[in-house]
Amino acid sequence: MSKVLVFGHKNPDTDTITSALSYAYLKQQLGVEAEAVRLGEVNNETKYALEKFGFEAPRLIGNVASEAKEVILVDHNERQQSADGIEEVKVTEVIDHHRIANFETSDPLYYRAEPVGCTATILNKIFKENNVEVPSNVAGLMLSAIISDTLLFKSPTCTEQDVQAGKELAEKAGVNLDEYGLAMLKAGADLSDKSLEDLLSLDAKEFTFGEVKSVVAQVNAVDVNDVLNRKDELVSLLNKNVADNGLNLFFFVVTDILNNDSTAVVVGDAAEAAAKSFGKELVNNLVELPGVVSRKKQIVPVLTEGL
Amino acid sequence: MSKVLVFGHKNPDTDTITSALSYAYLKQQLGVEAEAVRLGEVNNETKYALEKFGFEAPRLIGNVASEAKEVILVDHNERQQSADGIEEVKVTEVIDHHRIANFETSDPLYYRAEPVGCTATILNKIFKENNVEVPSNVAGLMLSAIISDTLLFKSPTCTEQDVQAGKELAEKAGVNLDEYGLAMLKAGADLSDKSLEDLLSLDAKEFTFGEVKSVVAQVNAVDVNDVLNRKDELVSLLNKNVADNGLNLFFFVVTDILNNDSTAVVVGDAAEAAAKSFGKELVNNLVELPGVVSRKKQIVPVLTEGL
């Protein structure tokens, strides 16, 4: 049997990288020649987790068709999120926690998706079903994935299963869940050395709400003051962006990933109306959004409705 | 929570009907208001299994969108095999053993596919994972599905997992596996009361092999003599069919589902060449095909190559 490659999505996050490593380990224990690989750069949060538990980042690959005949996908299934050349290889397994779309096979396969917060939560079950013990260092990787995907159990996507798996894996990994989790999230969300231009481009998406041409950007922070201390400079930059691009609204969300709250810096002629969508007044270009962490579930629908 | 419907594919077979009943039972034990339903007529084999273990056939439904908001699919996933109106309801779970195609969701779901011979083999695992005991009568249904899909473990699609699950379920159901299996398959494959015209239309597919316009039909039989005793009459009927439809070949396969062999009745100007594709001589319009049971895997590729 030739080698099977195990990988997650492009723009890899902690769940994608560590689930590839963890599942490749399990397959190896079951006698399969499996290798974890990755499709892009490893972020700071993931680097922190890999170092903590003594792992190297998986090998970076380009077109998968020149590497292997058979592959296993973790943490994704949609073709456009997967490796270049994916349509030329055989997908023998998928372990995922997302919707299914743009995915098709010609043969039966092992496909395991569950509506939980993290791929590692499913992997933890599969280890048990195969009677393979999760070693301490792999438990650390899987724990890191759960902390990352659920923001230490605070995301609306987190389920009771994720919490239970997280506690169990923290014990196996021999770390204090909250202490380690906070340190790992901080490593990924330290914005103090980022320029404001960096922040603007990190995760900005365009939307049109009715007639209102908008950009909604989001950054995660452990300390929102890393950003809000530079508010005046940021407002100038946002105003320039609005003018340059003919926008009516720039809605820049800074999410406090530890307290589950956000603050939005808002500019443009629709700024007041945007604040009103949330039942708020705009004060010095700021709107407080307590309890809001998800752009997809908690911000875009409100602006769609309000504008 | 409103009721969730559980169903298999159109033109239901034993796995589809019994897996809907078995999985609905499991979901009920887990506190879900689930109802098994069906999309078409129950065949003779399935009727035999349902009666044996004291079940009524599930309720027949038409357009699913007028029945429920949420559904669980068993033994299939492709839209065209599923209920009318399927695109208007939410698929919350799929338990299947086929390839994935023409399937897409907008939300994460529980999707469990494994490359085994039968859906019931996967269900047997899921009962265990949820610590729910399979009662004797449900075990009988699940056993019936495995016997049907694997032709009593003789199909090339049967895996070791199917064999193990079948043995375990036979014990729980309190039946002799071989005796019951034979009786059930016989109930479904009794061709003695079928007219030859019935047999010809039961499962005939058109193919063009190079220049050779062909029909390859297949019937499963416990006693091939139910068909072969009427060979002369059958050859006349096939010849008429060839003449009426301008065919070069009618390849009519009678499969002995107990001994894993087939006999083909072959007519048309390409009949000799078709026999030669299998390295055989045509004798009185007959070709013996020992070990052949699958049209898709063992007949069509050989004719494609040979003609």
Image (cartoon, coloured by chain):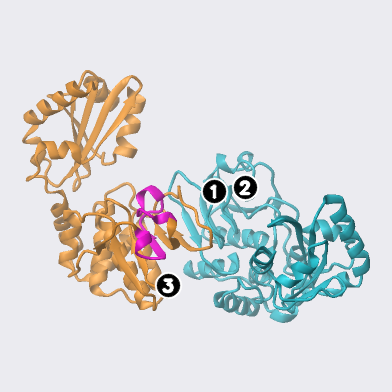
Chain colours: A orange, B cyan
User: In this figure, which residue is indicated by the disc labeled 1?
Assistant: B102
Neighbour tally class for label 2: few under 14, some 14-19, many 20 plus, Cα within 10 Å: some
| Distance between mark 3 and mark 2 Cα atoms | 33 Å
Q: Is residue A85 magenta?
A: yes
Q: Nearer the viewer, mark 3 or mark 2?
A: 2
Q: Is residue B283 left or right of residue A297?
A: right
User: In this figure, which residue is indicated by the disc labeled 3?
Assistant: A129
Residue type at mark 2? Gln
Q: Can residue A146 be seen by looking at this rendering? A: no
Q: Nearer the viewer, mark 1 or mark 3?
A: 1
| Front-most of residues B127 and B28 | B127
Q: Is residue A159 left or right of residue A289?
A: right
| Front-most of residues A209 and B226 | B226
Cβ atoms under marks 2 and 1 closer than 8 Å: yes
Magenta part of the chain: A64-87
Q: Is residue B44 left or right of residue B36?
A: right
| Distance between mark 2 and mark 1 Cα atoms | 8 Å
Q: Chain of mark 1?
A: B
Q: Do discs 1 and 3 belong to a common subunit?
A: no
| Front-most of residues B303 and A221 | B303
Q: Position of residue B266 (x, y in %)?
A: 82, 66
| Distance between mark 1 and mark 3 Cα atoms | 30 Å
Say which quarter of the image contains residue B8: bottom right
Q: Earlier in the sequence, mark 2 or mark 1?
A: 2
Q: Chain of mark 3?
A: A
Q: Chain of mark 2?
A: B
Instruction: Please identify the quadrant where the C terminus of chain B is shown.
Output: bottom right
The structure residue drawn at horizontal position 29% and vertical position 63%, both measured from the top left corner, is A37
| Front-most of residues A86 and A171 | A86
User: In this figure, which residue is indicated by the disc labeled 2?
Assistant: B80
Q: Position of residue A243 (x, y in %)?
A: 17, 21
The structure residue drawn at horizontal position 18% and vertical position 55%, both measured from the top left corner, is A45
